[in-house]
Image (cartoon, rainbow, N blue to C red):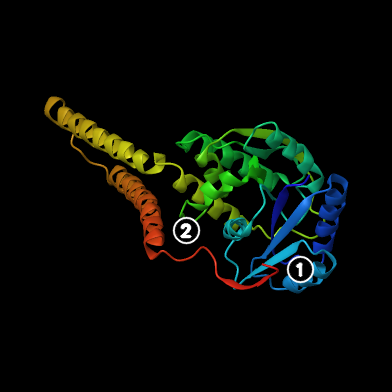
Amino acid sequence: MSMLISIVVPVFNADSFLHKTVEAIEIQRQESNWNLELIMIDDGSKDNTYLRVEELSRNYDYIKGVKLSRNFGHQAAVRTGLFFCKGEYIAILDDDLQDPPSLLPRFFEYLEKGYDVAYGKRRKRDDKLIKRFPAASFYRLLRILSNIEIPMDSGDFCVMKRHVVEHMLTLPERNPFLRGMRAWVGFKQIAVPYERNARVEGKSNYKFAMMLQLGIDGIFSFSKVPIRFITLIGLFGLLFAVTYGVLLLSLYFTVGVEARGYTTLALLILFFGSLNLICLGVIGEYIARIYDESLDRPHSVIEKTLNL
């Protein structure tokens, strides 16, 4: 393939196995005769990951590196890598080989057929149930809540034409949710089913708190349903209060029943007090995002680069 292909790989604490990732990409590069640039973004690793990137670049001249000043998160790291891409076809891979480079030629075929984006749809993932179930639930909840159609069971693993990436980079979100941004810009997209492999080595650095934050970013960045649901809850609460008040007055004037019951009163206060806190939390989440946008801070801070 004569055109330039860019592969973006965010890396984090990958010193011990990064050579395996590069070797797998190199095998496919030779097999497919790619004109390749491999951009590796070190997202504030605590080990010698960036030193490993520098070492590998001596053997593979197509490797380019970016070292971030601290850990800014997976989505910010990928976005930083996309900014430096020069290829006509651009792929996003993780560093753990769960999304193997050997699948990329199949994805590129769809771009050659006229599609603008080919994204991976996980048919099977070799993860524990405690990770699979929340992920599956999140995608289905996001599909219900989102005001755009975000594909289910898809991650950041994809290939895109350059103009798609350029449009994605114009979106100024401080809390980027890339698969949502990819769906939002539109163009002709297709899902490519595949079976996700186990990690090549070690344990995932994507902890539950990070997964939860990613889910929150996805829902609050692409859905107005939570804040509109608050209005419905308020209307329901008003209707309940009016109905309950009319019922008590009716019982008092018709059969002489007095409105007593401290337990009932305490439960009502507890219920509506908790409801108020939840509603304030949802409103606060949207306000916090407005605040983040108003600060206009960069998505990441680059400490140094390699071959860029």
Q: Which quadrant does the C terminus fall into? A: bottom right
Percent x, y of residue 60:
82, 63
Residue depicted at x 32% and y 46%: 272
Mark 1: secondary structure:
helix
Q: Nearer the viewer, residue 109 or 205?
A: 109
The residue type indicated by label 2 comes to Arg
Q: Nearer the viewer, residue 248 or 3?
A: 3
From the viewer's perspective, tell me whether residue 262 is left or right of residue 34: left
In this view, the mark in front (1 or 2): 1
Q: Give the quarter of the image for residue 161.
A: top right
Residue 265's place in the image compared with 143, above or below, is: below
Disc ID at residue 144 = none
Label 1 neighbour load within 10 Å: few <14, some 14-19, many 20+: many
Q: From where the camera sits, is residue 306 visible?
A: yes
Q: Give the quarter of the image for residue 307.
A: bottom right
Q: Which quadrant does the N terminus fall into? A: top right
Residue 3's place in the image compared with 11, above or below, is: above
Question: Which residue is farthest front?
Answer: 2
Percent x, y of residue 155:
64, 45
Percent x, y of residue 186:
53, 37
Q: From where the camera sits, is residue 17 visible?
A: no
The residue type indicated by label 1 comes to Val
Give the residue number, with chain letter if any, for mark 1: 53
Q: Give the quarter of the image for residue 206.
A: bottom right
From the viewer's perspective, tell me whether residue 71 is left or right of residue 21: left
Mark 2: secondary structure:
loop
Residue depicted at x 11% and y 28%: 253
Disc ID at residue 174 = 2
Residue depicted at x 47% and y 37%: 145
